[in-house]
Structures are given as C-alpha cells and as structure tokens.
Amino acid sequence: MTNLSLTFGTDGVRGRAGSELTEEMVKTLGLSAASYLGSDQVIIGRDTRESSPSFEKALAQGFKAGGIEPLLLGVAPTPAVAHLANISEVAGAMVSASHNPWWDNGIKLFSSGGHKLDDATQLQIETSWHENLSTSVPRIESFTSISLDSWTNSVLDSTTHLIFDGIKMVLDCANGAMSEFAPEVMRNLGAEVVVIHNNPDGKNINQECGATHLTSLQKAVIDNAAEVGFAFDGDGDRVIAVSSEGQILDGDHLLALISVDRFEDGKLTDDTVAITVMANLGLRRVLSAKGIKTFETPVGDRYVLEALESNNWDVGGEQSGHIVISEFATTGDGLLTAVQTLAAARKREREIGLWAKELVEKSPQVLVNLPVTKSGAGLVEQASDLIEEMKQELGDNGRIVVRPSGTEPLVRIMVEALDELAAQQVANSLEASISALDNTP
C-alpha cells in the first residue's frame, strides 16, 4: 500500500481499476476528502463500468468513516450529481473515468453546492490521503439511496414544452450514464428519438461509440434521415453533435450557437464567453464579429467554471463538448447543452447543422495525441524553443498549443493554419521532435 500514489489530474483522480486505482485507495480517498468538502452529506453517482459499483461502495464507506453521510444515486450522469449537490447545498462525488475505456475508473469530487474543487483543496486531500494510508475503514453494506428526478426535470424546464415536436434525432449514449435518461428527456420534449449504444454491459462504455467515436452516429443520422444526432461521453458531462449531412459539430460550434443565442436575447453578462486555449480561430472570429468578447482559460472545464464563477458570467466551454450554462448548471451537462443548442435553432426555425455551418467557418486544425513514457510537462519544456520558433513562423495565420495531458500519458499537439497541409506539416514536425526527445536516454 505504501508504494501506491494518488494524484488529481485535470478532472479528478483516474487510473486503471484494480492496479492504479484500487478499492482500498478509493476508501482512503473518501476518508481523506470528507473534511474538505464543506458538508455533512455527499451525493454519489456512478457510470456503467464494471468496477463502478464496488468503487461506489468503497467511496461511500470512506466518506462514512470520515464523518459525512453518503447518499447514493446509482447510475447517474455527472451533471445530475452536481445539480443535486447544488440544490441541496451538499457535496458530490462521481465514480467515472469519463471518456476513458472500461478498464479505467476515477473519482470526481464536488464541494458543497456542486462546485469542482480548486487546486489548493485537491492538494490538501492528496496530502491527507497519504497520511491516512494506514487507517482502517469499517465495512458498511447499507446506504441511503436517492432519486435524480429533479435533475431531469430541470433540463425539461430549461426550455419550452414540446419544443422538439416534429424533429427526428439520433442519440448515442456511449453505453454510459446517459443511456436511460437522455432518450426519455428528448421524447418528453416532443422529439422522435432513435437511440444507439444504450445497452451497457460493464465493458462497452465508450467502446467505438460516444463523443470520441462518431462514425456510427454519423451513419445512423444519415440512415435514419434524422435532422441531428448527439453523442455523449461515458459520464454525460459533454456532447458532440452531428448534422443531417453527417457533419461533426464539436464544442466550438455548439458554444457559438448558444453564445450567439444568449447574446441576442440579452442574457450574456458583460457580453463575454469563457473559452480555452484549444478554441478554434473560427469560433473566436464569429464571436468577435458579433460583438462578443472572449476570455481564455487553460484546458479543462473546471478552469472555464472558475472564470464563470469569479466573474458572474453565463457561458463557457471547450472544443471537446464541455459546455457550461451557469443559469442552469454548475458543471458541463451534455444533455442540457443538446437541449439548449437545438432549442436555439428551433426558435429561429433553422436546422442546427445549416445554422452552425453558416455561422462558424473553422480554421483547418490538426490534433495529435502523442503517447509518451517520460513526463509530458518535461518534454513540452524541452521542446519550448522549437514550439516558439514555429509559432513565430505562423504569426497571425495560425496557432500552436502543445501541452501534457492531465488524464493520460500523452502530449497533446494542436496546430491551426490557413490550410490543412501547412497545419499537418507543423504538427508532424512537432510530433517527431517530441517523440525523439521521449526516446532519448
């Protein structure tokens, strides 16, 4: 046990279930976090991974030993946990590794009121975790269960009754936490819904489906002559759309539609939207042309959330499909985002894909996820001179972002340029250089 380590990444704690993250580690995390969440109760949800039920129980046992009462939702999306924590003014925890494969798992924590933890609090919990490694946690088998109906009702209440009457859509639920809830909400709003990947078996979450694998959704949208498709990730806090023509509408497109809609309705405080460094030039240009200002944050929806909360702003998001609408939620909510985006198009009697295509002309962008064995941060630092040199060569005609992943052993490379060939050449050069550094003894 003493050789194990626990570290918070971009979005909570993650690792391979049973080795990098064990039930004992999760128990100790619950015990250690209990003192830092600002509540005497904690709402726990979980996704559909094989290891999630046992991790849910272990986390609940740890919280109970730490002096706070666990309330179990069972299978539930992350935004449901955050919503219930917010309206009940209690803490929250989600057992999930988001878009990672089934063999991984993780824990996301929310302080009282449903807000993600800041870096300082996470560091305190890490320290406490190491101090508590030898502390025994009692086995408790019975816990209080609660319903998430207030979350689904809040999504329904965020728009007009039966607003999607006459719309045919396809939902890809990633065999994850949205499998039961998203189809029900969309049907209650009047839509004709075709559902794919909504039969979780513990090992098929995110498997060639969901927000990171869109091929089957694109095919289903075209085969079913649907107006739109939405793909969620495993825990439901983000969404990517597909137009009737099979065009991918990522977080940049969805954020543009929601931001313009709220701006035109006078609901965008300070006329400002929070974006991340990964936001495409096309998004930046359309927002600027509309008179909407942008505030840039590091990658990670919690940094977007921090910007919104500290400035009382309304909307922010990232390209991966994490969109936050603070009027309704304290974190990214894939279902809410889908509802709000489609409702904005419906108000204008526009098909969502055509509106997005007309509004956002994205710059060619190349993304590379480079597996590495050394420290990603160290490799990025070693390559900093080359990165800066290439940035200067692109000038105002492109952008480069190179960063270590906060959740996986990867260096992420993003290059934008006037044409795809130029972007690909720069990305290839950076990939080769960083790979060479990684392979140098």
Image: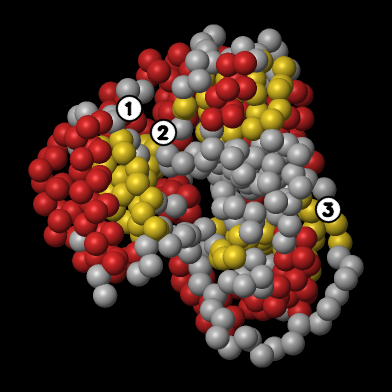
In this rendering, would 339 be left or right of 297?
Answer: right
Residue 219 vs residue 153: left or right? left
Could you say where residue 200 lies in the image, as x and y percent from the top left? 74, 44
Residue 277 visible in the picture: no
> Which is nearer the eye, 201 or 59?
201
Q: Which amino acid does label 1 sit on?
A: Lys
Looking at numbered disc 3 in the image, what kind of residue is underneath it? Ile
Residue 366 lies, in percent from the top left, at 31, 39
Say if residue 18 shows up in the picture: yes
Q: Which circle marks residue 252 in the picture?
A: 2
The crowding category of the residue bearing disc 2, from other C-alpha atoms within 10 Å (few below 14, some 14 to 19, many at least 20), is: many
Horizontal side of 378 relative to 117 (left or right) equals left
Q: Which of 165 and 206 is in front in this view?
A: 206
Whether residues under marks 1 and 2 lie with C-beta atoms below 8 angstroms apart, the answer is yes
Q: Is residue 440 above or below residue 253?
A: below
Mark earlier in primary sequence (3, 1)? 3
Residue that carries the numbered disc 3 in the rendered image:
146
Q: Distance between the residues labelled 3 and 1?
A: 44 Å
The mark that comes first in sequence, 1 or 2, is 2
